[in-house]
Image (cartoon, helix red, strand yellow):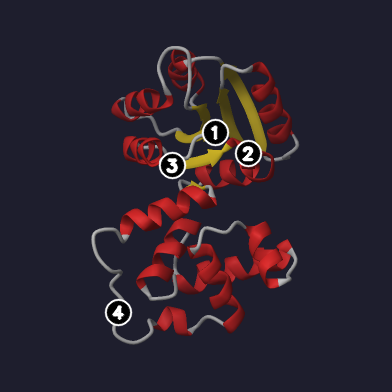
Amino acid sequence: MTISVVIVDDHPIVRAGMRAILNSAGDINILGEGVNGADALRLVVELRPDVLALDVQLPDLNGLEVTRQLRQKGSSTAVLILTAHDDSQTVFGLLQSGAVGYVLKDEALETLVSAVRVAARGETWLSPAVARQVVNRAVAGGPASHPAGIPKEVSALTARESEVLRLIARGLDNTAIAQELCLTKRTVQNHISNIYGKLGVSCRTEAALFAVHSGLG
């Protein structure tokens, strides 16, 4: 199934790089491109893409306002934010406005295609550094509540899967996990798929939250 995408960024070089990355994936079709918030709103209405890849800093409306307006209009397009910033105010403002994903530009070459696919499924994609902030916010205001005993889902994990889950909760990406555990990235990806299945979660952030609240974080 082909995923339709609109790209909005005011830097031509950035757009070109994103276009090249997404065009390399056989299941992604770029419907259009824009340079500002007004373009984003217009293109989403006209083209109804599955995913809007949206820069935060735009000449007119910022990514936060664009996302809010799209949600107010009832748009079903998933908004995937691309930015160089990972400060808490920006992160949580965008997530609260309705964005489903947050990709840091210095990770985009490696993660953009995966992020678009996840967003198109209606799931959440967060860069590891951002995911860690979400976990920290979730457990702020008091110690994490650790359920009595070990949850049965965690008991189902192998020792290696538990190690991978701990590192996910620490905010490490797949490359860093592979280096930490002396594994290939493919092996790490397989472990993460198994972890998602056993925990009944669908994204990295949910897995990290599960780990923290189970005492593994």
Disc 4 marks which residue? 147
Task: Count every numbered label the image shows and give the total.
Answer: 4
Disc 3 marks which residue? 100
* Mark-to-mark CA distance, 1 and 4: 37 Å
Above or below: residue 2 compared with residue 159: above
Residue occupying image coordinates x 41% and y 21%: 62
User: Dot 1, crowdedness within 10 Å: few (<14), some or many (≥20)?
Assistant: some
Residue 127 seen in the current view:
yes
Q: Position of residue 40 (x, y in %)?
A: 47, 19
What amino acid is found at the position of numbered circle 3 in the picture? Val
Q: Which disc, if any, is residue 106?
A: 2
Residue occupying image coordinates x 50% and y 18%: 43
Q: Secondary structure at mark 4?
A: loop
Q: Secondary structure at mark 2?
A: helix
Q: Earlier in the sequence, mark 3 or mark 4?
A: 3
Q: Residue furthest left?
A: 141
What amino acid is found at the position of numbered circle 4 in the picture? Pro
Above or below: residue 125 compared with residue 6: below
Residue 49 seen in the current view:
no
Q: Is residue 187 left or right of residue 126?
A: right
Above or below: residue 103 compared with residue 155: above
Q: Earlier in the sequence, mark 2 or mark 1?
A: 1
Nearest-to-viewer mark from 3 and 4: 4
In which quadrant will I find the C terminus? bottom left
Q: Do tag 3 and tag 4 residues touch (Cβ < 8 Å)?
A: no
* Mark-to-mark CA distance, 1 and 3: 17 Å
Q: Position of residue 143 (x, y in %)?
A: 28, 69
